Image (cartoon, helix red, strand yellow):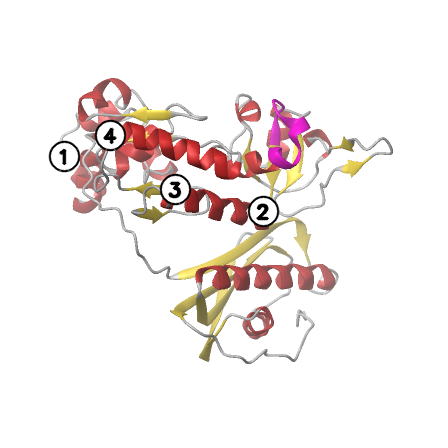
Amino acid sequence: MDAFYASVELLRYPELRGLPVVIRGRGDAQPAVLEDGSRQFSRLKSYAGRGVITTATYEARVFGVSSGMGLMKAAQLVPDAIILPADFGAYRHYSRLFKAAVAAIAPHIEDCGIDEIYIDLSKLAGDSLALAQRLKQAVRESTGLSCSIGLATNKLLAKMCSDLDKPDGLTVLDLADIPARIWPLSVKKISGIGPKTTAKLASLGIVTIADLARTDPAFLRGHFGHSQGTWLHEAANGIDDRPVITESEPKSLSRETTFDRDLHARQDRQALSEILTTLCEDVANDLHCKGYASRTISIKLRYDDFRTVTRNVTLSSPIANPLAIRRAAEECLRRVPLKRKLRLLGVRASTLSSGRASNDSMSGQKELPLAG
């Protein structure tokens, strides 16, 4: 999906089309409704805090704004950009709509998250390009949103070429097209090559995918190990034999948030309590949507000195109720030192199982036990 969160927001606020808009995590940047019925939106230049960008419209991206960038840095690049808080409930709704529209035409789908899927067209009759065009039209009719499709012989190439002509693109990539269309790109465009690997490759004089494709595999294995070195060479040459996996079991579901300012367990107890409740509700909703319950609940804390700690508790029976998840998270928190201020809090559910969860509402302690 194209700039998915931002595109959903433009359905709600059509007057923002064509303007630079950034979406942040949870926040209070809701637009104000004026007396004449028009809306007044917050601007990036008025933002102060440590939040990061979740996504941005393409009009904002031309200024160098990108997902994961700090909002304060983005404000330097495009101060007049509109800032909106994320609405994950709406995004999940539109995610279900677009996936259902695709599944009605091409049911062999691998779900890769809220805004991305792989589709195996090899088992369907008809021309693949025509099928892809039908899929784009079905998504637009179902959601009012655009998507970009990459049509290729494997998942790695399909992922890469889906980004070549965004937004609203439909790109066909044959193996013969790799030297002209893929090799000139930076190695970081290969899904699976992150900043650290990109930097290490650059230190070896390998900057483009062409550089990587022409590097002796033995040289790569010597610097990255046998498995990763082999994969790097194969990926640069468009080799990928991974199947489209239509059924997979998630290992865990989690939610976390970084605070706009450091919060203290005592002075900011109420704010932390509300954040914990929201995270637990979000995890419970994710479990419900996917039909799972969890036996292991974990919390993640990051202190103001950037140290990160985790704690978990494994229960006798699976749960999916937000109150039950919260009480388990509270139990974890009792085993964490809370002398320092906090910058991040997260909740994770793992040891997942399908079927009914325990009916125990886990009622009891309602307040967050954050004591120094």
x, y percent for residue 283:
53, 61
Q: Which residue is mark 2?
A: 90
Q: Which residue is mark 4?
A: 127
Can you tell which of label 1 and label 3 is closer to the viewer? 3
The secondary element bearing badge 3 is classed as: helix
Q: Which residue is mark 3?
A: 102
x, y percent for residue 104:
37, 45
Closer-to-camera residue (14/303): 14
Q: Earlier in the sequence, mark 1 or mark 3?
A: 3
Closer-to-camera residue (372/114): 114
The secondary element bearing badge 4 is classed as: loop
The secondary element bearing badge 1 is classed as: helix
Can you tell which of label 2 and label 4 is closer to the viewer? 4
Distance of label 2 from label 4 (alpha carbons): 34 Å
Q: Which residue is mark 1?
A: 217
Distance of label 4 from label 1 (alpha carbons): 37 Å
- Magenta residues span 10-21
Q: Residue furthest right?
A: 35
Crowd tier of the residue under label 2, counting other residues whose Cα lies within 10 Å: few below 14, some 14–19, many 20 or above: few
Distance of label 4 from label 3 (alpha carbons): 16 Å
Q: Residue 158: in sight, yes or no?
A: yes
70 versus 358 height, above or below: above
Q: Earlier in the sequence, mark 2 or mark 4?
A: 2
Q: Residue 202: in sight, yes or no?
A: no
Looking at numbered disc 4 in the image, what kind of residue is underneath it?
Asp
Q: Which residue is rendered at x = 33% and y = 25% of the image?
A: 171
